[in-house]
Image (tube, grey):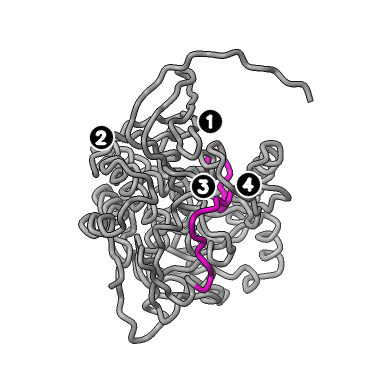
């Protein structure tokens, strides 16, 4: 391979207290928590909007509640509150969410459905970040880390304004792909243990007729009613079994790699229809991703054609929204000071340094937290091993695939984001490293911010 040696260049420097890399599900909340705790905070995001997987790859926000409905007699508890709930409250004001709509079927999977409007989520979170005083570096890539032994001094960022160095005291990686951690020299692996997807919005459809279609074939799965187009008691989540409809239908669904579940907060619109693809290599491989992008878009068209052909009320359906790039569930797995195990999750274990409680598992009912309870995310699971001032949140943590099927979910990532943003700001205030911060002071601040912690 030939190489080109870049000439030296003087980069302009900007100074902040906290750098948050990635403005996705965890990063938004991290930046809000950091700024609200007095830190001069910059959020660096490669795209022109915030929200990440919450607005690109999911079907709803999973999950603010414990799985109480699957366990008769278990108390209903909202176990994730704080800034994540604030985002839902802001969405309610602009008609951008179903609210926490109780599941009426398949409540052994989730007790509620919190569906969102993808575009309003972007706007609401951007406005909240502006109000908190976060500096927004959108359309900006992090391309390197400036290291001093085991301490990060700064990051290299690049945009159409040019390359620049951004110095800070605390750093948070919420990129999903683990970009900052990798640049900083953290230990990581690339398990490639998930498929990728691109969820599309399909317009000119009938939610009610899709419901009737599934019912008529005894194929109805998920079912939830909530706020839709300003009216309560409307269908906001549906899923079905393709195999129960017909062999021809099931074959078409399989060839398109289409999930049958959808959510919506608007009439005549399926907000999310997920189209999948299994990559032979890690989604960090640029050339393999390019091929996947093309194939997924072919499958998107097939999915729309399935609705047009088979589902009444969808004869003139069309694609109204796609994600700009394919979505992942895991890129790089970053080694942290503690690795959450499947036993931790299923047994409902809590730790002496919990930063949140969580009660949802995406493999339910096969895997559920014991007795409809919760488990704790320990602070040490968010501290990047070998680096003094770097935290990781979201899809980056938890090596075991089945345990990761819980910790990677959107609401868990949001809760992790509030914790790491708070930690980063406190470390700046107290002039200490991530491992030197006293947990008692962190716990007090989190509780004051509305975070729910088990007693």
Mark earlier in primary sequence (1, 4): 1
Callout in the foreground (3, 4): 3
Name the residue at 33% across, 59% down.
98
- In this picture, residue 409 sits left or right of residue 299: left
Disc marking residue 301: 4
Name the residue at 52% across, 51% down.
396
Q: Position of residue 107 (x, y in %)?
A: 43, 75
Q: CA distance from mark 1 to mark 3?
A: 17 Å
Mark earlier in primary sequence (3, 4): 4
Read off the residue under disc 1. Answer: 144
- Asked which secondary structure carries label 2, the reply is loop
Mark 2 in CB contact with mark 4 (< 8 angstroms): no
Tell me if residue 357 is in the magenta stretch: no
Q: Position of residue 214 (x, y in %)?
A: 53, 70
Callout in the foreground (1, 3): 3
Residue 69 occupies quadrant: bottom left
Q: CA distance from mark 2 to mark 1?
A: 25 Å
Q: CA distance from mark 2 to mark 4?
A: 42 Å
Read off the residue under disc 3. Answer: 386
Callout in the foreground (2, 3): 3
Read off the residue under disc 2. Answer: 133
**Image quarter hosting the N terminus:** top right
* In the depicted structure, whether residue 77 falls above or below residue 201: below
Label 1 Cα neighbours within 10 Å, binned few <14 / some 14-19 / many ≥20 = some
Q: Position of residue 186 (x, y in %)?
A: 55, 44
Look at the image and give the residue range highlighted in magenta.
Answer: 323-343
């Amino acid at each position: 391979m030939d190489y080109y040696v870049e000439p030296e260049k003087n980069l302009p420097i900007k100074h902040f207290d906290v750098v948050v890399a990635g403005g996705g599900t965890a990063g938004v909340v991290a930046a809000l928590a950091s700024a609200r705790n007095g830190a001069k905070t910059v959020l660096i995001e490669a795209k022109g909007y915030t929200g990440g997987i919450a607005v690109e790859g999911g079907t709803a926000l999973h999950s603010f509640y414990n799985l109480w409905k699957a366990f008769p007699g278990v108390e209903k508890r909202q176990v994730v509150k704080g800034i994540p709930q604030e985002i839902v409250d802001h969405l309610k004001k602009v008609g951008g969410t179903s609210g926490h709509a109780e599941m009426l079927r398949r409540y052994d999977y989730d007790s509620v459905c919190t569906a969102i409007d993808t575009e309003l989520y972007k706007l609401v979170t951007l406005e909240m970040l502006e109000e908190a005083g976060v500096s927004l570096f959108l359309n900006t890539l992090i391309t390197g880390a400036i290291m001093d032994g085991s301490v990060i001094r700064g990051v290299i960022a690049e945009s159409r304004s040019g390359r620049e160095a951004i110095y800070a005291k605390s750093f948070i990686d919420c990129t999903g792909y683990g970009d900052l951690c990798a640049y900083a020299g953290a230990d990581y692996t690339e398990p490639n243990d998930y498929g990728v997807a691109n969820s599309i919005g399909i317009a000119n459809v009938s939610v009610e007729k899709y419901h009737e279609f599934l019912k008529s074939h005894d194929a109805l799965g998920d079912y939830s009613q909530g706020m839709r187009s300003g009216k309560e008691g409307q269908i906001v989540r549906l899923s079905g079994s393709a195999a129960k409809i017909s062999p021809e239908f099931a074959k078409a669904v399989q060839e398109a790699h289409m999930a049958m579940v959808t959510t919506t907060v608007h009439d005549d619109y399926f907000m999310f229809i997920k189209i999948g693809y299994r990559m032979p290599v890690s989604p960090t491989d640029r050339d393999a991703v390019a091929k996947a992008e093309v194939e997924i878009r072919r499958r998107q068209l097939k999915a729309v054609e399935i609705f047009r052909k088979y589902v009444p009320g969808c004869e003139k359906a069309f694609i109204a929204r796609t994600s700009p790039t394919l979505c992942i569930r895991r890129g790089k797995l970053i080694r942290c000071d503690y690795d959450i195990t499947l036993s931790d999750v299923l047994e409902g274990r809590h730790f002496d340094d919990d930063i949140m409680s969580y009660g949802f598992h995406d493999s339910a009912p096969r895997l559920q937290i014991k007795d409809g309870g919760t488990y704790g995310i320990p602070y040490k699971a968010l501290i990047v091993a070998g680096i003094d001032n770097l935290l990781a949140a979201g899809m980056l943590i938890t090596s075991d695939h089945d345990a990761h099927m819980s910790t990677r979910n959107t609401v868990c990532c949001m809760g992790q984001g509030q914790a790491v943003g708070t930690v980063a700001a406190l470390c700046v205030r107290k002039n200490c490293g991530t491992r030197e911060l006293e947990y008692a002071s962190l716990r007090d601040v989190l509780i004051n911010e509305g975070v729910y912690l088990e007693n």
